[in-house]
Amino acid sequence: FYCVNDIAAIVFQGVDVELSTEEFQNVTARVILATEVQSPFKLTEATIRTEILGIRENIVVTLLTDCPSTGHCFQRWAIDMEPDVSVGTCELDGSYVLQFTSVCQPSQISECPLNPGVDDLIEVQFSLDSENFCANALPNVGVSAEINGYKDPARTVPTSIS
């Protein structure tokens, strides 16, 4: 058994909302997670789980930046989500579990202390707290005004205002 020490941090969280006059056309959210593991390891095969209805069905993890072939491995992962606003998913709030497979870097396979399938899984748990990104539609209310001027305090003799 060999312990892979991992460090992870969320370095970006953002939502892009494209609106039309009727309803949402497209909502995409992105979280970028930075990870680090010690040499000779690296992380692969990322999968993610969440119980948030409207997100769990539409989530993809992609490796953005891979590590060099030797030394500590620093990687960046994009977690892209398309929240389903039609079921009322207007926030990213909740718990997520990102699972990786740890492997040895290709240049260090001969010195790899891992037992594949036994001690190669890494889990990163995190929570997100976001704003409500669903727009609240307000009716367009017309406003008009009129100003009248009077010559006397009783307001009985009108005057023109220039």
Image (tube, rainbow, N blue to C red):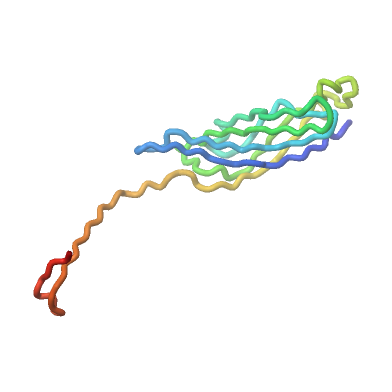
The spot of residue 14 in percent (x, y) is 56, 41
| Position of residue 120 in the picture relative to residue 159 (left or right) | right
The spot of residue 133 in percent (x, y) is 48, 44
- Give whichever of 2, 40 is nearer the camera: 40
What residue is rendered at 64% in x and 34% in y? 49
- Give whichever of 141, 107 is nearer the camera: 107
What residue is rendered at 64% in x and 28% in y? 62
Relative to 143, say whether 34 is above or below. above
What residue is rendered at 77% in x and 36% in y? 36
Relative to 93, say whether 77 is above or below. above
Q: Quadrant of the C terminus?
A: bottom left
- The part of the image, by quadrant, that contains residue 21 is top left
- The part of the image, by quadrant, that contains residue 10 is top right
- Give whichever of 124, 111 is nearer the camera: 111
Relative to 99, say whether 90 is above or below. below
- The part of the image, by quadrant, that contains residue 22 is top left
| Position of residue 139 in the picture relative to residue 59 (left or right) | left
Q: Quadrant of the N terminus?
A: top right
The spot of residue 113 in percent (x, y) is 89, 26
